[in-house]
Amino acid sequence: ILRAETPEAIDLLHQQAESGKDMMRLMSDLIAYLRDLLVFKAKPDALKEDVDSDMQKSLASHAELIATDRLLELIDQFAAAEGRMKWAPNKKLHFEVAIIKAIHSLGQATLDEVIEKLGELRDGRARPPGAPAAEPIAAAGDRGGNKPKPQTASVTDPGYSAPRVAEKAVTVGAEKIWLQVLAKIPAKSFLRTLSDLVCPIGTDGRNFMLGHSPDDKSKVEALASVNNRRQLEGLLKEATRGDWSVKFVAKDGIPSKSTDATKPAESFKDDPLIQEAIELFNAQIKS
């Protein structure tokens, strides 16, 4: 399925059916494997004690074939198919349709990908099919035209620091917008936990750039799912009254935020609820 090999997938399903495999059990096993694959992509060590080494190698090879948001879509599709199969007399037929539909969906562009491409075309950063490629400046000079003179900039040149100043201003503006977005997300929600892994690094046209540590890539893929991106873009629209497309960028130099330092053991004693409980029950805390 992940390699989009439809005939081979259908043949394998027929082999399982002819050998007497229960279709409902096979569908349940498939969904369970996709769930393990999802967990493996988020945290490879999470299943170390639950599966053998051969299964871990299989998960590692399959994890490279599919993105997290696509994997979530597959699980949803097969879970819906499992519900239809439960009361269907011809369960194999529904299984076949589910496999074909899943492979077909993997080959389709997602709405986020379409919006991103449209944004690139609008900003002039992508070349439409059939459009002539931009000619390098060096090639134009070789045809006898006026060759550009090399220019040098010194530290005292007034324009030397202009790009850096502009870049800093854009970054500061993006940080201010991002703080407004975070303020609208419930502090203990899963979306907020994932959003804390990224930080704004600027804007590019209508793309709101969120940077993250390369070490957090697997967790940020969950934030990049269709539903989470849609929520973030909706909050950005509320904060700025403009349409944005969220883009995630792995960038060296950004510290990993997936593992927070453990708070000192004594710090919980200062919690107001703990203090109230101590007074109410006349209790003492012993270490």
Image (spheres, helix red, strand yellow):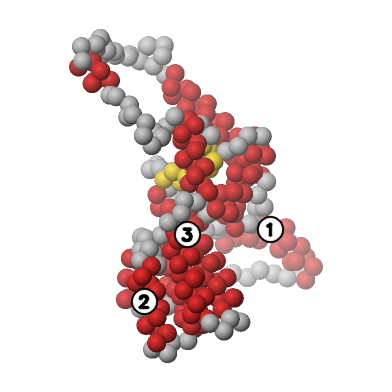
Residue 23's x, y, as percent?
48, 83
Q: Is residue 218 among the parts visible in the rendering? A: no
Q: Which residue is rendered at x = 38% and y = 67% of the image? A: 6
- Alpha carbon distance from label 1 to label 2: 61 Å
Q: Is residue 71 among the parts visible in the rendering? A: yes
- Alpha carbon distance from label 1 to label 3: 50 Å
Mark 2 vs mark 3, foreground winner is: 2
Q: Is residue 179 left or right of residue 155?
A: right
Q: Nearer the viewer, residue 30 or 20?
A: 20
Q: Is residue 266 left or right of residue 49?
A: right
Q: Amino acid at mark 2?
A: Asp
Q: Determine which residue is flagged by label 3.
A: 105
Q: Are marks 1 and 2 in contact (CB under 8 Å)?
A: no
Q: Which mark is residue 271?
A: 1
Q: Determine which residue is flagged by label 2.
A: 11
Q: What is the secondary structure assignment of the residue under circle 2? A: helix
Considering every residue shown, the one lying at the far right of the view is 280
Q: Amino acid at mark 3?
A: Ser
Q: Amino acid at mark 1?
A: Asp
Q: Quadrant of residue 190?
A: bottom right
Q: Quadrant of residue 37?
A: bottom left
Residue 82's x, y, as percent?
55, 76
